[in-house]
Image (cartoon, rainbow, N blue to C red):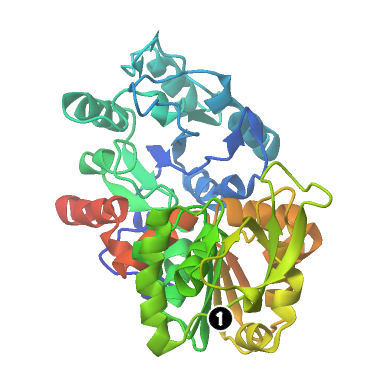
Amino acid sequence: MNRHLIDSRLPLIQDADLAGKVVLVRVDHNVVKKGTIHDPYRIDATLGTLYHIVERGGRPILMTHVGRPRDKKTGRIKVDKGTSVQPIVEYLERKLYTSFAVPAFPVDSELGIREIDTSINWHIRDLEEHRIGGIYMPNTRWFAGEAGEGEGRERMARQLAGLADVFVNDAFGSWQPEASTYDVAQHLPSYAGFLMQKELINLKHVLEPQEPFVAVVAGAKYDTKIGPLNEIYKKVDHLILGGVIYNAFLCAKYGIKVQGVSDVDVQAARDLVEQDKNAGKIVELPFLVESDTIEGRVEGKYRTVSIGDFKPGQERGYFLDIAPQSFDTPQVAKAIGEAKTIFVNAVMGLTPHFFEGSQKLDNTIDSNTNAQKFYGGGDTLQEFKNLSPGLYLAAMDSAQYYFFTGGGTVLKAIEEGSPYGLDPVKALMENKERFGK
């Protein structure tokens, strides 16, 4: 690990005293959907940290969030199999040839788990005496105090801290300040795990890119990406857009109306259109797939259209993908082909029915053998794997590629200009000052 590329204020796991210690590890294993793991990449990415802890004599207690079990309107927490950590535990047991205990705590039908009760002490004793390989806490978002406020949250942080001697944060993808990512670091000697360090090092290459720098950004809503998009725009030589973000840009620039694009998004995109009149950084993808319906790929109801045919006041159908030939046009091929750094946080089409744009994008980027390629996590990574499995496997072993485990965290860090202002990272640095480690 290149320590010199990491802010010296950050405490690192390699400097922690782990021998004979119970180590509480926050990971981002949020890979379960409807009770099934679709891609274990984010689990595998933390195995180096777990091995290091055990190899140096530590005994691990793991915790992660899974999904969104809290209803935003009512505040009710739904505890069920769909957001259980059980599939993760089963995967780890198969992978590591060891056993994990998952504590069971009383569940309130409205508030989820209110307390970490003393029954966990039996598991900790088994852990310390090597009868089990680890403890895996229930979904952190099942706990009333995880994302709450006030006394309940503070109590959860103290109860978590009471389980262990050391805290390690290896959850780069979980940038929100919650009890298990932020508050607990106020009570225990705390360190950044190896995945956290790796993500920070690679993020530095995005924040301080080798030029020419090309970013590809897409999203389902424009207004949620305004902050990161404005910062990315300042850094890039070329910006390629996709999804509703691109559709909103086209509406704002060409004065057309597109189904599924809100007036709010079009209004937000107007600033980018004005900005680009002078800088000219946005590389337009000239051919799109227009559909009469979003219900799927219905024969006779979709077609390829050209932005050259747009006229002010036109009302268009749904733009659900980028037509693959867009990436063969001289301006697009040149921008991607000459880049030295490429950052991708984008799915270009409405999958699973419209996927050719994303597939062509990934293959076009891969054909540039001189660039460093950085892909955001989540949907971007999942679609890459689904659409181009062979390329995905090759890329996983290539020094020219890096796949972040948290795409949203990358965008947040880009928006802020640094990852060291993110609350969980800041908590670790403040911890170093407090404990003098």
- Label 1 environment density (alpha carbons within 10 Å; few <14, some 14–19, many ≥20): some
Between 65 and 336, the one nearer to me in the picture: 336
Quadrant for residue 181, please give it. Answer: top left
Whether residue 258 appears in this view of the structure is yes
Q: Residue at x 40, y 30 (%)?
A: 140
**Callout 1: helix, strand or loop?**
loop
Of the residues shown, which amino acid type is indicated by label 1?
A: Val
Q: Residue at x 39, y 37 (%)?
A: 24
Between 412 and 136, the one nearer to me in the picture: 412
Residue 422 in the figure: left or right of residue 365: left
Whether residue 197 appears in this view of the structure is no
The quarter of the picture where the C terminus appears is bottom left
User: Above or below — where is 321 with respect to 312?
Assistant: above
Between 123 and 362, the one nearer to me in the picture: 362
Residue 194 in the figure: left or right of residue 417: right
Which residue is disc 1 drawn over?
A: 283
Q: Residue at x 59, y 35 (%)?
A: 32
Quadrant for residue 332, please give it. Answer: bottom right
